Image (tube, rainbow, N blue to C red):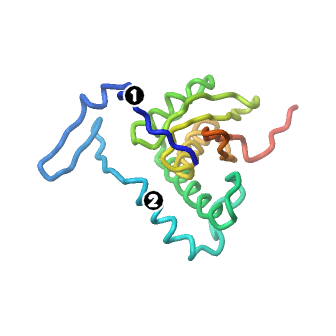
Amino acid sequence: WFHKISSSPLKDDDFWDTLMIENSGVWSLMGERMMMVHQDLILRFESYFLPYLDNIHEGRKNSCLWGNLDNKKSDMWTIFSDTMREIFFNQGHHVIISKEQDWIAVAQRHLGKNGLGSIDSINSIDDFGGIEILTTSCFHPAIYCGILSGCWERAYGRNVKSEFRVESDTNILKLTSLSEISYQ
């Protein structure tokens, strides 16, 4: 996947106004305790975990498509994404979408503030909440897809299908309803 490191300063200085650092090395932003996980740790976990993966035993097996990945890595990313989606959904966040541009603020709140990515542009692709997201900032595709899938499910109350691909240095995520919706 493509990940461009942003060289622009942080747009929202309010985060730094709420930084608190305690003596024990614990720190928080906006009252939430934070920790840093380097991308290399996730990638090493992937390389360690991959040989032991035989198939998906639980969760939604066909809800994620990963472009040109081989079957094993696709299964692993589906497990990661489905886990992140389920964790996010069960946290009970309120996600309200009235127009497609609302997704940019949702991504900033649930991805950007944690260093997991952002949305560069977004397009509506159907009348039922289907969207196509373009980004050059993505910590890990499975984590990115999982959190935004959880946001989509909280916003629309239906199961989501996600498709991730890379085209000319741009990550593209398509989120649509997992179930076909018929017109009456």
Q: Which residue corresponds to the image point at 49% horizontal and 39% vertical from the top-left?
A: 4
Mark 1 lies on residue: 8
Image quarter hosting the C terminus: top right
Q: Is residue 64 visible?
A: no
Q: Give the side of residue 18 with respect to residue 77, left or right.
A: left
Nearer to the camera, 100 or 68: 68
Under mark 1, the amino acid is Ser
Mark 2, residues whose alpha carbon is within 10 Å: few (<14), some, or many (≥20)? few
Nearer to the camera, 123 or 139: 139
Where's residue 167, x and y in %? 67, 41
Number of numbered discs overlaid on the protein picture: 2
Determine the CA span between mark 1 and mark 2.
25 Å
Q: Is residue 18 visible?
A: yes
Label placed on residue 40:
none
Mark 2 lies on residue: 42
Among all residues in the image, which is located at the extreme right? 184
